[in-house]
Image (cartoon, coloured by chain):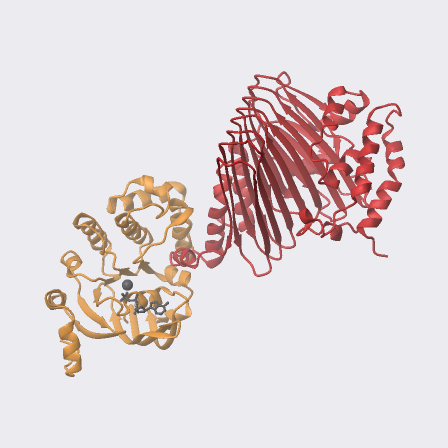
Amino acid sequence: MALLEIKDLYASIDGNEILKGVNLKVNKGEIHAIMGPNGSGKSTLASVIAGREEYEVTKGSVLFEGKDLLALAPEERAREGIFLAFQYPVEIPGVSTANFIKASVNEIRKHRGEEPLDAASMMRLMKEKLALVEMDKSFLSRSVNEGFSGGEKKRNEIFQMAVMQPKLAVLDETDSGLDIDALKIVANGVNKLHNEENAFLVITHYQRLLDYIVPDKVHVLLNGRIVKSGGKELALDLEERGYDWIKEELEAGAPQNS
Amino acid sequence: MMITANDVKSKLIENFNVFELNLQEDESNPIAEIRREALKNFEAMGFPTRRHEEWKYTPVSKYLKYDFEPRTFTDNGFAAKDALPDAAISGLRANVLVFVNGKFQAAHSDIIETDKFEFRDIASAINAEDPYLFSRLNAVIDREKDPFIWLNQAYMRDGAMIRIKDRVKLQYPIYLVNMELPSKGNYLDNVRHLIRVGDHCEASIITNYINRSGEDRNLGNYFTQVEVGDHSHLQFYTLQYELGNGLHIGNYEVQVGKESTFSTFFFSSDGRLVRNVSNIILRGEHSEGHMYGLYSLDGNDHCDNRTVIDHAVPDCFSNELYKGILDGNSVGVFNGKIMVRPGAQKTNAYQHNPNLILSRGATLHAKPQLEIFADDVKCTHGATSGQLDEEHLFYLRSRGLDAANAKALLTYAFAYEVVEKVKIPALREFLEKRIQGKLLIHD
Ligand SMILES: Nc1ncnc2c1ncn2[C@@H]1O[C@H](COP(=O)(O)OP(=O)(O)O)[C@@H](O)[C@H]1O
Ligand SMILES: [Mg+2]
């Protein structure tokens, strides 16, 4: 059974149809990259997986470990093991990062039938994961993302991912706006967490990230549909040739899977 | 038959003699004259109606539907000691002064710093014909505006008279506990507190209002006068968490001398009717007024906060932050006036009133007012109201927090901006717990 199985998914927002028949299957242990030009629907797909309520699914299904994901509230999805690293993480003044992460970890543990972590173990867990993304522990006492630089916000997302240990992590352009050092930190975080039991869906604009996170599959999302899938070499092609040749191929009726 | 506010007024005036008899004050005591004059003023004004601009959004006559009788007894079969735990603030060491049904309770009070300030209960100051008391009673500034001040002056029974000597730094706060106990009948308690802080002092005062009956047939009418000398710092905290459905009117009149700082905090979270009126006069140059408020209301709570900060002289600073959280069918009223008198140049005055509206049934009336009669001044004000941010909610939920918890966390974050200003650690922790408890945040 696939970890994630998306079948013929249509989704719209404010009456605009954005996803127009997405099909995607992700198995445990795999890393998939999703690429595509701006506005093609990548963030929409991520939002629908995470359960953002503004998006209306008009057709299709999403199964997570065989269960109907679309029937679950966002927090239930998180507890089941879905994690979204936001393209634009919000700043939440007044909510301390430590308190928020503590609440989050314990909600997930409760869902798994585990005891809440005591203060010392919680601290140990957070410190270990902070080290992974090379963040200082002073971050914990600050409000969530408040006054963080762009790079710090992205690292904070990876930090949270590391703490929550999801089964499926969706990274929405976590690489954009990062300098090469920060990019390596993010990639390193992903590689450290990656194992045979989890999977990653890495949305990116640039091939650059894929030098560090090596995907098993690369998909091209164009105008709300996955129009081409291939191995990691597809990313290099896209980097070199852009997306126009795919559009042309499509118009010429070429086969969609190389 | 339905009782109206007018009936309540007539009965109060009619029965004034009975009240006086019960108090057994000496006929020759100057207080008799002070009371009668106040009664006359009250009679002339009557209870406010909606036509009074100051009462537009607080229809007080609606709540005056019982023939309230000024309470002159204390023991009503409900022992104060059973209610006192309600006033406990864990970890707070303080000079405690307890008033029950408007009467001082020496047995439950405990002054630690006896050498640093004078305390006298007003009932005995009246009987001793204390000239200081009379001078303060005759120095009410807000003569025109509020009939409840006159009602208080006519019917006051007791209260705290506190004088902090010059050059005194209190180590512990003064904790004034005002407790109304349940009793059969419809009672009105009129309590007067008089506070004088000398020059070069530092002190903090906490007043806590507790209505154990939790019924709207109990009306507490409090009037507090504060004088801060020169070069002094006073923090004044007001807690209104245990009023149930009780009715509470609080008038505060504060005068601040030169190079002094007065900070006031109102934490209100209960009460069928709560009205807090603060008149703060900065009457010495280079003085500061800081006004903080947090009203978190739900159910049928109605809370009306009015502040006037009066810049009477040049070179003063004031800052006001009142935050509101409105849930259920609650009503919040905020009216903040900045007054800059002619000649009060170089005034800096800021006011901000953000509100979080959590339900469709809740109503907010916010009205900032500027009356500026000087030209070289900086004043800003703003009132906002909004809901919780959907993006914030989704972010928290996407990390596994359920919707209710995410809301509670964000609401707490909204409130915290005020709570963090509290400088007494035990009080701050108490407030954090109260607010979190109310929001059902679980660890
Ligand atoms: N609230 C909205 N109403 C209408 N259209 C929207 C809304 N939000 C996003 N869109 C449109 O949906 C399309 C896909 O957006 P998005 O999923 O963010 O693309 P990507 O992440 O691939 O850049 C874009 O054309 C965008 O303009
Ligand atoms: Mg996007």
Placement of A246 over or under B101, stated as above or below? below
Residue plotted at (84% across, 42% down): B12
Q: Is residue A170 visible?
A: yes
Figure quadrant, ligand 2: bottom left
Above or below A208: residue B19: above
Please say whether residue B244 is visible from this viewpoint: no
Is B133 positioned to the left or the right of B430 in the image? right
Please state which of residues A210 and B279 is positioned toward the viewer in this rendering.
B279
What shade has chain B been given? red
The picture quadrant where one finds residue B151 is top right
Q: Establish if A87 lies above or below B166.
A: below
- In this view, the residue in front, B250 or B183, is B250
Which chain is orange in the picture?
A: A
- The residue at the far bottom in this view is A253
Q: Residue at x 25, y 65 (%)?
A: A28
Residue B144 screen position, x and y as percent = 72, 38
Q: Of A166 and B391, which appears nearest the observer? A: B391
Residue B156 percent across, percent down from the top left = 78, 33
Residue visible at 35% across and 64% down in the picture: A50
The image quarter in which residue B192 lies: top right
Image quadrant for the N terminus of chain B? bottom right
